[in-house]
Image: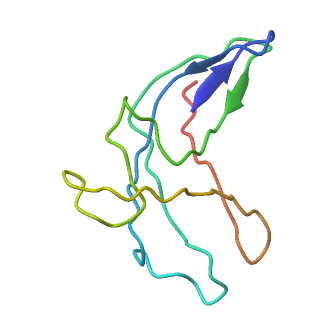
Amino acid sequence: MCDVDPSGRSTNICDGLLRLVPGKPAPEPDGTLRVVIDLWPTAHRFLAGHRLRLQVSSGAHPRFARNTGSGEPLATAKTLVPADQSVFHDPAHPSALLLPVMG
């Protein structure tokens, strides 16, 4: 999750990490995956004119250990499989970002 200032500069606020491996979780009947990603605890005040950005990516190496996408053991993996991410938001595939708001 990022804070985007009025000039467009994006600053990371917190992360949520979920390592997916082939076949886990099992795909839905339409081939999509339903996943829940918990964001790490944080507190942040968004200033007036700032926006919230939710960024979904396949990795953040070297910040976090790479995900090869192959299912091979991380220490010895040689195969790299590219991953594309799509977030659906329709009646059949609802999505949500739930954030507590402190007064």
Residue at position x 77%, y 16% from top? 8
| x and y, in percent, of residue 63 in the image | 37, 29
Q: Which colour scheme is used?
A: rainbow
The tally of labels here is 0
Closer to the camera in the image, 98 or 57: 57
Name the residue nearer the viewer: 38 or 58.
Answer: 58
User: Where does the image place residue 6, in percent across and percent down from the top left?
Assistant: 80, 11
Instruction: Quadrant for the N terminus, please.
Output: top right
Q: Residue at x 33, y 67 (%)?
A: 71
Q: Is residue 80 left or right of residue 76?
A: right
Q: Which residue lies furthest to the bottom in this view?
A: 29
Image quadrant assignment for residue 74 = bottom left
Q: In this view, does 58 lie above or below 46?
A: below
Residue 43 position within the rendered picture, expressed as x and y whole percent measured from the top left: 46, 23
Left or right: residue 93 compared with residue 19 = right
Residue 80 vs residue 73: left or right?
Answer: right
Q: Where is residue 45 in the image (x, y as percent from the top left)?
A: 58, 16
Residue in the picture at 38% in, 33% down: 41
Q: In which quarter of the image is the C terminus?
A: top right
Identity of the residue drawn at 54% across and 56% down: 82
- Residue furthest out toward the front: 78
**Residue 100 placement: quadrant:** top right
Q: In this view, does 94 lie above or below 11?
A: below
